[in-house]
Image (cartoon, grey):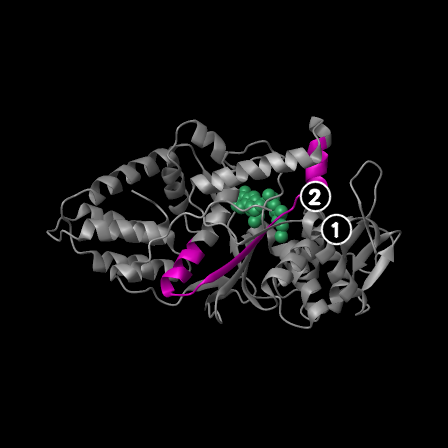
Amino acid sequence: MQSWPRPSIPRLVDAGLGTGPVVRVHDTARGEVVPTDPQGAARLYVCGITPYDATHLGHANTYLTFDLLQRAWLDHGVDVHYTQNVTDVDDPLLERATATGMDWVELAERETQLFREDMTALRILPPEDYIGAVESIPLVVDLIGRLESTGAVYRVDDDLYFEVRSAERFGQVSGWDDETMSRIFGERGGDPERAGKRDPLDCLLWQAERPGEPAWDTELGRGRPGWHIECAAIALHHLGTAFDVQGGGSDLVFPHHEMSAAEAERATGEAFARSYVHAGMVGYEGEKMSKSKGNLVLVSRLRAEGRDPMAIRLALLAHHYREDWEWFGDEIEAAQERLARWRSAFARPSASPAKAVIDRLRGALANDLDAPAALAAVDEWCAAEGDDVDAPGQVALAVDALIGVTA
Ligand code: 5CA
Ligand code: ZN
């Protein structure tokens, strides 16, 4: 699939401003903040949208998290190879298409295009590989074949299931006990009750054709991919095993990332990702923001109301990425004011020297992407006076490179 345009990123090292430190992030599997240690280019996979509705602030917050991670890596001097999927065939998409009388392909294309426009406006770095579920069916079939050869696949009617406990490290990502896994599995698209399964947690790899639903002819029969195997197949194909970071929102810790990792590790005998990084959930005035609750704050709507995308970006960055938080309308006003303050500070003829604030910015971001600390550092610099004539331009450059906010 087509990705979206890449925003320009100044290279601070070329401006004589040095490089940033080693980047540390919180790994859900280990439960602690760990240094990233890419061998060559950093390899990043982030779970993409299911395109049945427009991008809301929760999605934007998740993709912004991994944009910051990339900026911190680039500033440290590490190249990045980034892959993201689009779940362009799945139950919620088909249900929405049926409910609205739309063709599911058209719905997916329309919402994916709107997502690209939102990401472009927010200056979020695009993936090199932007890959749809439909176009990756051959990869999925191939990976299921590899799993079959390990003996970990069985049939229930004409559907194929994966024996999750055949993966040695099943449970490594969430670290949850059986009771928690079973409860959440049912709540998040799993089918613990289905008769004929060997274990309630076993997950669907391939779903045989259902009446009225799309299906593809493959050596597994006519049908379509399960959800978790989609991301396992796309990530393995484009990034290989033991890639640096598997990312997404915290709603994906279990079952999605647990199952994808189990499938990939059983098939390859190697680690799937080296770290699992999860952004918190953004809610709206007391509730989880979700398509089904109809309480979405859409990026496209804020843009249509004339909000500056850079203010939207700053409003999100005012929260640490791992925090669960709620959007109240006044956050955008505060962000707009901050943006105006920053822009006038960057336009000053002189200011206090840039080095200290740039060091603080870099230190904050490298320390588990601490954006609120980074914003506080810039705020303090803006409030101080000084006679360094290079400083305003240098700080503006660093804010562009590291935080993605342009003057
Ligand atoms: N297509 C799958 C991933 S393979 C999916 O979860 N799609 S999604 O459209 O539901 O979500 C897209 C991304 O946004 C995921 O990384 C998800 O974890 C994240 N996300 C969804 N809702 C929220 C929210 N309320 N707050 C923060 N992140 C969210
Ligand atoms: Zn995914």
Mark number displayed over residue 310: none
Amino acid at dot 2 = Val
Residue, disc 2: 89
In the foreground, 38 or 378: 38
Residue corresponding to mark 1: 225
Q: Position of residue 379 (x, y in %)?
A: 25, 47
Locate residue 59, reporting x and y percent. Answer: 52, 43
Q: Is residue 205 left or right of residue 356?
A: right
Could you tell me if the residues under marks 2 and 1 are in contact, i.e. CB atoms within 8 Å?
yes
The range drawn in magenta is: 68-97
Name the secondary structure under disc 2: loop
Q: Residue at coordinates 61% horizontally, 68% vertically from top-left?
A: 241
Say left or right for 232 vs 277. right
Residue at image position (34%, 45%) is: 405
Residue 244: % across, % down: 53, 65
Q: Nearer the viewer, residue 323 or 38?
A: 38
Residue 193 visible in the current orientation: no
Q: Name the quadrant containing residue 114.
A: top right
